[in-house]
Amino acid sequence: MTEVATSFADAAAEVLRANDRGQRTVAAPELYPHQWSWDAAFVAIGWATLSVPRAVEEMRHLLRGQWATGMIPHIVFTADAGYFPGPARWRTERAEHAPEVATSGICQPAIHSLALYSIGERARRNGGEDAAVFRSFLLDTFDDWVRWHRWLDSARSTHPSGLVEIHHPWESGMDNSPRWDAPCARITVGRMAPYEREDVRHVAAADERPEDADYDRYLWLVEQLVEVDYDDEAARRVVDFRVGDVFFTATHAISADLLATLGEDIGRPAEAAELRGMAARARGAVARTVDPQTGRARDFDMRAGTWIDADTIGGFAALVCGTDHEAYAALVAQLLGPQWCAHPALAHPVPPTVTPDSPTFVSRTYWRGPQWPVLVWLFTWALRHHGHDDAADAIGRAGRAQLGDLTFAEYYDSLDGQALGSRNQSWTAAVALAWAA
Ligand code: 9WN
C-alpha cells in the first residue's frame, strides 16, 4: 500500500474510532447520535477491514432492536439526546412486538446480509480467530436474519406487484428523493403535537436538508403508525404513504440470496432454499417495474395505483439485485453514460442521486441531486459481484477520489463537489475503508 493510501485509510479509521460507542457506532457524531439500521451494515463492512470481531459486535447490537415480528427497526436508540424524533415521539412501547430497547417503529433497506457476506469473506481470508468468531456469530444469529427477510416477504410483499412496500419515506433511506414527491403530495397532515427540528442545527445551511413541509408529513406518518400501534396489517390499511420501493426490494433480493449462500455453508439447506425463493420473487418484482421507454426500474404508488416516474438512482435497482445479462449490460452502459456518471456538469464521475438533466435536480439538497459515497460504493460492490469489474473499477476510482478532502461528508454537491450534510459520517468512512482495503 502506498503512503497516500495508508493515510487515506488511517483518516477513515480515525472517524470510525471516534464514532465508536463500544458495541455500536453512531451514524454521525452530532446529526445522528444513535445506531441506524442500514448505516450499521455499511459501518460493519468498514469495521471488518480493521477488526472482524468489532464488525460482528456492530451487527449483534443492531439485532438487540429486532422486533418479535422479525422487523429490524431503522433506529436503535441509546441514551444520547439530540435527535428528533426520539423515543417519546415514536412511542413504540404501544406495539405488541417491540423489544425492550427503545427503537423507531419503521425499517430501512435490507442491506444487512450483504454486510454479513462481506464480513464473512474477510474473516475467511484472515482465517484463525477471525474465521471462528464470524462462524460462531453466524450460527448464533442466522435465524434472526432469516426472520427479517421472512417478515419483508410476508408482511411487506403482499401487494400483487411483489414489491416491498414502505410506509414512510424514511424507510427508503432516501427520504426526500423525488421518487416520493407524488405520494407525499397527496398526504393531508392532520392535527399533532408541535415539534422542533434538531437536524437543521447541525448542518451549515438549511437547504442541504428536507423542507419543513416534508418534516410535517414525516411526523404525520409516525402519528398514523402510532395510532394503529404499529400493527402491520392495520398499517397497510391506514397509512397515507404506501409505496412499492423498488430499491428496497432489490436489497431484499440480493441479501436473501447472500444469506442463502451463508446458510448453505453452515448446513441450513431448508432455510437456504426458502431464502432463494424470496430472492427470486423479489428479483422478478424488480424486473417487472422496468419502464420500456427508459429501461430503468420504477416505484409503484399503491394508494394511487400508478407507477412513479422519477429520474433517480432508484432506477438502477436491478444493478444491485441482478437481472438478465442483456438488461444488466444495458443498465451499466446507461449508468456510465452522459446523463449519469459521464454527465459533463458533474464534479466527479460517480452516480448522482438524480440526473442533472431532471427538472427536479438540486445539486446540494440531500437526496435530490448530491452524490452519496455510500451508494456509490454499493454500486461498485454490486457491479463487481455481477461480473462488471471495469465499471466497478472506474466508478470506484472516482468515488475514492471524491473523498480525497478527508472530510468524510454525508454527501457531496454533485456540481461543485462541496462537502455537505454531516462531516465524519460513519458510513462514508466505512466505505472509504472498504475501497482502500
Ligand atoms: C432519518 C443516518 C440516516 C440514513 C438515511 C438518511 C438520514 C435520517 C434523518 O440519515 O435519515 O432516518 O434524520 O435525516 O436519509 O439514509 O440512514 O445516516
Image (cartoon, grey):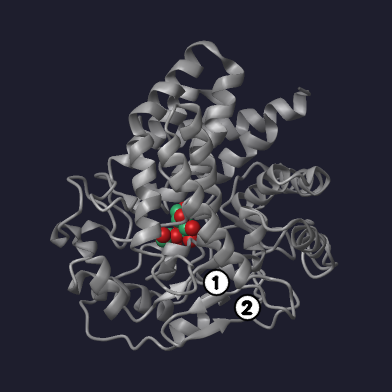
Q: Are marks 2 and 1 in contact (CB under 8 Å)?
A: yes
Q: In which quarter of the image is ligand 1?
A: bottom left
Q: Which mark is residue 177?
A: 1
For the point 79% across and 57% down, the residue is 349
Q: Which amino acid does label 2 sit on?
A: Ala
Residue 37 x %, y %:
41, 49
Question: In the picture shown, does residue 119 fall above or below 347?
Answer: above
- Quote the CA–CA distance across marks 2 and 1: 9 Å
Question: Which quarter shows the N terminus?
Answer: top right
Along the horizontal axis of the image, is 64 left or right of 38? left
Q: Name the residue under label 2.
A: 310
Quadrant of res 122: top right
Question: In the picture shown, does residue 368 fall above or below 47?
Answer: below
For the point 51% across and 31% down, the residue is 47
Residue 101 x %, y %:
21, 45
Residue 143 x %, y %:
34, 38
Along the horizontal axis of the image, is 157 left or right of 379? left
Along the horizontal axis of the image, is 40 left or right of 312? left
> Is any atom of residue 400 visible in this view?
yes
Residue 95 x %, y %:
17, 60
Q: Which mark is residue 120?
A: none
For the point 75% across and 63% down, the residue is 327
